[in-house]
Image (spheres, helix red, strand yellow):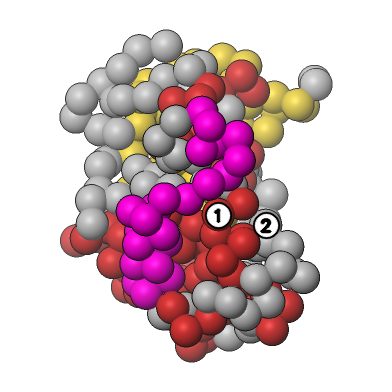
């Protein structure tokens, strides 16, 4: 496992298999720091499989993934560096927002605080600031089941911010949301990018991809067909990689 400095993550000819089935073939691309990088492609093209392999490289059959900082094999350090947001929020509906924020907090100052999941004054201030950023400060003691789908996804982003994650992996976080809520989620991701975070997002909406992503990685049939920087985006080309 090597480290590189020019990019946050670099994939070189990565092959991913499940038993005898090849899911991704010869994937090569880079993830630059402090950008929103969109991974797009039709259903079954290898998008989610690839980001899962970046998060957990043990699934890589062949090829190489290089990281510019935390080595994923240093599991504790890697977990502190990343957050993973999926279509279905990882929340306890019967508990309030505050409980869900502190439940998986990883940055306690010492083992005793970690054992009792105790938040000191500074932790609590950071928790509130994280909720403010995503527009949920007024819902801090609301039970999660009273939140809308968009609010639940914003809560997931607040959890990532509270944990001070450097990289946020997001697997179609807007797929179950309406246009207004989808746009609000992407606006929050843009704010995080401006805070020097890196967002790697599997995205199903071409309009959101074109507006918010600085780079797109185009998947087709288990292969990376092309990578495109923002100044080269062409809707007529990119729309061919979305389900109709």
Question: Going by the image, does 63 lie left or right of 188?
Answer: right
Outermost residue, bottom direction?
Answer: 180
Vertical arrangement, residue 57 with respect to residue 7, above or below: above
Which secondary structure dominates the residues rendered in magenta? helix
169, 14: nearer the viewer: 169
Q: Quadrant of residue 114?
A: top right
Q: Which residues are magenta?
A: 111-134
Question: Going by the image, does 90 lie left or right of 212?
Answer: right
163, 153: nearer the viewer: 163
The residue at 28%/66% (across/down) is 191
The residue at 23%/57% (across/down) is 195
Outermost residue, top direction?
Answer: 1
Secondary structure of residue under mark 2: loop
Identify the image quadrant of the N terminus.
Answer: top left
Give the number of the disc on residue 90. Answer: 2
The image shows residue 217 at horizontal and vertical percentages of 41, 48
48, 67: nearer the viewer: 67
Residue 237 appears in the picture as rendered: no
Identify the image quadrant of the C terminus.
Answer: bottom right
Q: Within the magenta stretch, is there residue 62?
A: no
Vertical arrangement, residue 38 with respect to residue 69, above or below: below
The image shows residue 212 at horizontal and vertical percentages of 33, 68
Q: Which residue is mark 1?
A: 102
Q: Within the magenta stretch, is there residue 121?
A: yes
């Amino acid at each position: 496992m090597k480290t590189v400095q020019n990019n946050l993550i670099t994939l070189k000819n990565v092959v991913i298999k499940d038993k005898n089935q090849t899911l991704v073939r010869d994937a090569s691309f880079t993830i630059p720091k402090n950008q929103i990088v969109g991974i797009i492609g039709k259903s079954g093209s290898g998008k989610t499989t690839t980001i899962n392999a970046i998060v957990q490289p043990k699934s890589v059959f062949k090829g190489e993934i290089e990281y510019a900082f935390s080595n994923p094999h240093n599991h504790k350090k890697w977990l502190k560096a990343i957050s993973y947001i999926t279509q279905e929020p990882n929340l306890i509906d019967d508990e309030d927002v505050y409980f869900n924020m502190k439940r998986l907090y990883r940055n306690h100052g010492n083992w005793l605080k970690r054992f009792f999941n105790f938040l000191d004054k500074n932790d609590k201030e950071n928790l509130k600031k994280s909720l403010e950023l995503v527009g949920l400060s007024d819902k801090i003691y609301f039970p999660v089941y009273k939140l809308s789908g968009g609010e639940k996804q914003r809560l997931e982003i607040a959890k990532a911010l509270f944990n001070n994650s450097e990289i946020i992996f997001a697997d179609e976080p807007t797929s179950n949301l309406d246009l207004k809520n989808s746009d609000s989620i992407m606006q929050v991701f843009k704010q995080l990018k401006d805070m020097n975070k890196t967002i790697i997002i599997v995205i199903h909406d071409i309009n959101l991809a074109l507006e918010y992503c600085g780079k797109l990685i185009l998947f087709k049939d288990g292969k990376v067909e092309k990578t495109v920087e923002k100044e080269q985006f062409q809707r007529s080309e990119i729309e061919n990689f979305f389900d109709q």
